[in-house]
Amino acid sequence: MSSPVRSRSRRVFAALFAGRLLGLGVLVVLVVPFPVGAVATSGTVLIPEERVVEEDLFAAGSRVIVEGTIKGDLTVTTRRLIIRGVVEGDVNGLAWSVDISGQVGGTVRALAWTVDVSGSVGDDLMAFGRSVELDGNVGRDLLVAAVSARNSGTVGREIRGELLWSLYVDGAVERDIDVGVHRLTITDSAIVGQAVSYRRGVLAQNIRGWGARADISDSADVGLVAEVKPTPTDISVRALRLLFQLLRFVGLLFTGIVLIGVFPRLSQRAADRVWRRPGSTFLVGLLVFLLVPVAFVVTLFTVVLAPLALLALGLWLFGLFAGAVPPLVALGRRLVKSRFEMVGAFVVAAIGWRVLRLVPLVGFLLYFLIVIWGMGAWVMAVWEGSRFSRRKHKSSLPAGDAVGPRMELLGLDVPGS
């Protein structure tokens, strides 16, 4: 029989091996479709105007600027991607912002906060981010998943995608528009060759009261316009959905009670942090909510950091479920007149929170705010607890065990010896 130390070592080795294998798999998926080419890493990667890169280019830096010509594909990880020159192949980018004012012969695949195309894209433009602005030309389809998007240029075939908020069209679309959106605006200068169909988006289907509407100018050159209504759900599907919501609520109660019972001091610190410093706690939670997925995507491309990326994502997902515990404990103690322990206050507030979530829009916003607030409270409570433990450990050390070189080792006399 193997010892506990050996068993633990095997588990750690298996986890590291699985993480590295996953990271290697991601690299293979990214690299295999493209021929091996040049690699450039720097603070700023610049392809000057007179430079011609005869092969594929893989670039990483705070900025990647292309003013020359790349005859192959361009794959980048950067904060800002600027293309003023020519890329004859495809562009695959993970960036904060993408600005294309030059020419791309192939397809652009971009995961970025903002995507702005004022130049030309020969094939498809596939964009995922907060906003997408098209003032130039796309040879084939515009495929988008974003908060908002605008087409003031020309799309050779179709616009398809999911928009949490709006799509504004004052340019030309040769064929169809088929989007899930909250608000669709088509101005009098827009041209749509065939049909326009819109519906409530995938995310909006889970938000009560979030519908879809269209503002289409009578002067717009548009063919058939249709709103796609969601198919009425069967009674069995609604029953299963209600059962799932009930199980999720029971799971939240169980998770909260377990966390409070196993980590009472940590839960107390988190609840106190919520009430005493709400602004800073919410800001920390918002940063965690936004930055952890971005950090996961970036570090997953590295073999060494892939296990840490998976661990951080797992904790982040758990925080989406258990993040509501500290705010509900804090609110439960203040809302009820009688004195409750943490468990009682949490249960009372959780029931009221579940009822308020039935209110259209308000319930979703309240859920979002409470979870982010709680994520920040957990993070700050863990940080303050670790800092307090370090101070307590240092203060408990005898004077002779203080950190630093001992006087005897320096050949000096120790006072009192």
Image (tube, rainbow, N blue to C red):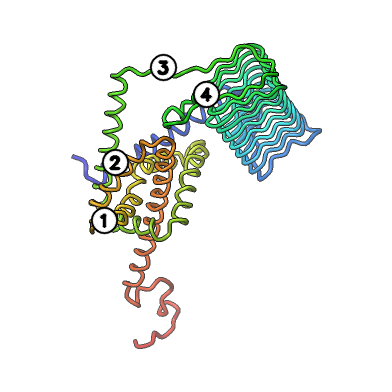
Q: Residues within 10 Å of mark 2 (few under 14, many from 20)?
A: some
Q: Which residue is mark 3?
A: 231
Where does the C terminus fall, quadrant-wise? bottom left
Q: Which residue is mark 1?
A: 264
Nearer to us: label 2 or label 4: 4
User: The residue under label 2 is which amino acid type?
Assistant: Leu
Residue that sits furthest to the left in the current view: 1
Q: Earlier in the sequence, mark 1 or mark 2?
A: 2
Q: Residues within 10 Å of mark 1 (few under 14, many from 20)?
A: some
Foreground residue, 50 or 155? 155
Q: Quadrant of residue 391?
A: bottom left
Question: In this rendering, does residue 218 appear at all?
Answer: yes
Tell me if residue 398 comes above or below residue 320 in the rendering: below
Q: Earlier in the sequence, mark 3 or mark 4?
A: 4
Residue that sits furthest to the front in the current view: 218
User: The residue under label 3 is which amino acid type?
Assistant: Thr
Expressed as whole percent of the image width and height from the top left, the position of residue 368 reads: 42, 42
Q: Which residue is mark 4?
A: 180
Label 1 to label 2, Cα distance in Å? 17 Å
Q: Please give the name of the residue rendered at 61% of the width and 25% of the height, measured from the top-left corner.
A: 215
Q: Which residue is mark 2?
A: 252
Q: Earlier in the sequence, mark 2 or mark 4?
A: 4
Q: Earlier in the sequence, mark 2 or mark 3?
A: 3
Nearer to us: label 2 or label 3: 3
